[in-house]
Image (cartoon, rainbow, N blue to C red):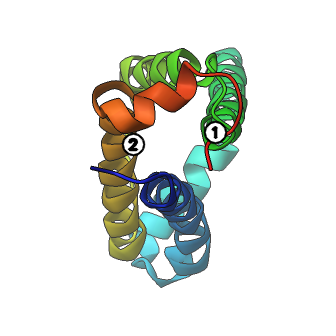
Amino acid sequence: MMTVKQFRLFLTLSWVLLVATIIMFIWTEQYLPPPLQEYLNQQLEDQAGIMESFLLMTIAVILGLAIIISYVGLYFWKNWARPLFLISLVAGYLLSPLDTAPVVMPAWSYYLGDLATLFTGMVLAIIYYNENIRQHFTTIGLPA
C-alpha cells in the first residue's frame, strides 16, 4: 500500500528529473561534437517555417504550463489535476511527431529524460490505479 509520503516522493522525483533533464541538456550541449553543435545552432537560426515553429512553441508552452499546474494540483490533491495531467501528457506525446527535425541530445540529458518519463508514467499509474492514493482526490480535505 502506497503512503501519501511515498506518492509525493514519486511526484517530486518526476518533477526534479524533468528539470534536471533540461539543465543537463543546457550544461552538456557544449560537449557535443562540433558537427552536432553546428546542427543545433543551425536549427536555432533557421528562418524557414517560422510560423510552424511559432505554433509548435506556443503549443509546447501551453502544455508545459498545464503540466506544471497539474503537478501542483496533484501535490495538493485537487480533483481536476488528474485529468489535466493525463490530457497534457497524452497531448504532448501525440503532438511531438509534428516537430520533424532530428533530435540531438547529450547522453546524460537523454538518460535523465528517460528516468523522468519513467517516474511520470509511475505517477500517472498511481493516481488512477492505486486505491489509497486515488481516494485522496475524491475526498474533501487534505490527507494527514
Q: CA distance from mark 1 to mark 2?
A: 37 Å
**Camera-nearest residue between 10 and 102:** 10
Q: Is residue 52 above or below residue 42?
A: above
Which residue is painted at 63% across and 44% down in the image? 75
Q: Which residue is mark 1?
A: 46
Please say if the residues under marks 1 and 2 sit with CB atoms less than 8 Å apart.
no
Which quadrant holds residue 77? Answer: top right
Q: Is residue 39 above or below residue 84?
A: below
Amino acid at the residue labelled 1: Asp
Residue 131 at x, y percent in the picture: 32, 30
**Camera-nearest residue between 36 and 72:** 72
Amino acid at the residue labelled 2: Val
Which residue is painted at 49% across and 15% down in the image? 87
Which quadrant holds residue 58? Answer: top right
**Camera-nearest residue between 93 and 117:** 117
Residue 41 at x, y percent in the picture: 60, 58
Which residue is painted at 35% across and 25% down in the image? 128
How many marks the image carries: the answer is 2
Query: Which badge, 1 or 2, comes first in the chain's sequence?
Result: 1
Q: Which residue is mark 2?
A: 123
**Camera-nearest residue between 40 and 112:** 112
Residue 3 at x, y percent in the picture: 41, 54
Crowd rating for badge 2 (residues with CA inside 10 Å; few <14, some 14–19, many 20+): many
